[in-house]
Amino acid sequence: MPCPAQKPAPARPRTKWQRTLALLCLAAAPLYASDAPVELKLVSEHPVEGIARGNLSGLAWCGDALWAVSDREDDQLFRLDTGATPWRAEAERFELPPPPASGLPWGMRMRAWVSGQVRGGQMDFEGLSCDELGNRYLVSEAHAAVLRVSPAGTAQWLALPGSLVRQARASGMLLHFNALFEGIAVDPNAERMWLAAERERRGLLVLHRQQSSWQCAGSCVLMSEGGRELPPPALGDSPVPRSFSALTFFRNKLFVLEPSSYRICRRSPASGAVERCWSFAAEALTEERRYSVPYGNVEALWIDAEGAWIGVDNNGKARGDGEKRPVVWRFAAPAGGWSAQP
């Protein structure tokens, strides 16, 4: 029940219930005030050359370099030369093995195949992560599968349980074309892996490694939620679906990129519960950086102690200042670090 608006004292005495509600509202007021996420500070931005059509869909720091993946390229990763101006994407090719059976409905698989024929990218790689050995993990939205690419360039599909897709769909996720797995995070020891379902419904799932395969420890589903939310004021007042577009693991916490609200949220790796959020809307939605699309197009995220890397998948579209290349933003870590409490 909403807190009553402040009015002049009523003529008759308040009931005990009304007094209790008023006290609860006063006690909760500081919590309401702290709900607005702190704005992150932009340190630098970097246009990237060498990624076709601007489709940068994942970022991960592996070894001594920042790597990227494109959802239009099925057989290559990109090592970003961050010493060049502008940044250069250097392709590393690998031999792609045939994808495993996905467990997705026939109609959804056919739509993905047709889309891949038209726009390129049959795998539709939408996320990138890395373990401490330098293995790269790519999540395929089209096939609901995960590809591991070794430092030597050998690629192998991971053995995922058939119950993964069934559980996700039973929870309302993965029901709509082009709204499937959008993010992936692997812990440094490659013992746990999290996947983010994009939207309608969005959610988080977790898998545990058992020797050479990955399994659900009970339920794979950590959380699932639907609904719509208002975007930042610069994008108007029409509600948009809640969504996730990237996922990363840092210091035993999950960090999720929420493109509709232009924020990064720290979540529990055990439950998916949100703990704290930080906004980057003020910097991302200036006139010169804004794109003429009614949705967020930030799709890549990597967190480290000093800050956050956020990548923009602009689909070849120009932003306000005419820039058509994909862009990577560097934001400083918040005061107190990413582990700070509200």
Image (tube, rainbow, N blue to C red):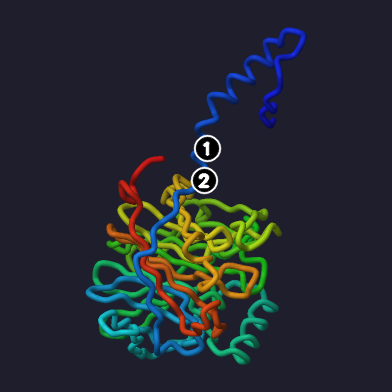
Judging depth in this view, the residue of 46 and 54 nearest the camera is: 46
Q: State whether residue 189 is above or below residue 15.
A: below
In the rendered structure, the answer to whether residue 27 lies left or right of residue 340 reads right
Residue at point 49%, 57% (across, down): 263
Can residue 164 be seen by looking at this rendering? Answer: yes
Along the viewing direction, whichever of 216 and 147 lies nearer the viewer: 147
Examine the image and state in which quarter residue 187 appears: bottom left
At x 67%, y 10%, the residue is 16
Callout 1 environment at 10 Å: few (<14), some (14 to 19), or many (20+)? few
Secondary-structure class at tag 2: loop
Report the Cα–Cα distance between label 2 and label 1.
7 Å
Residue 342: image x %, image y %?
41, 40
Q: Indicate whether 122 appears above or below 283.
A: below
Q: In x, y percent, where is residue 306?
A: 28, 59
**What is the three-letter code of the residue carrying label 1?**
Ala
Q: Residues within 10 Å of mark 2 (few under 14, many from 20)?
A: few
Q: Are marks 2 and 1 in contact (CB under 8 Å)?
A: yes
Q: Which residue is mark 2?
A: 36
**At numbered mark 1, what does the secondary structure look like: helix, strand or loop?**
helix
Q: Which residue ends up furthest to the top in the rendered image?
A: 13
Q: Say if 155 sits above or below 7 in the image.
A: below
Mark 2 residue type:
Ala
Work out whether residue 227 or residue 20 is closer to the camera in this orientation and state it: 20
* Residue at image point 52% right, 42% down: 35
Residue 122 at x, y percent in the picture: 54, 86
The residue wearing badge 1 is 33
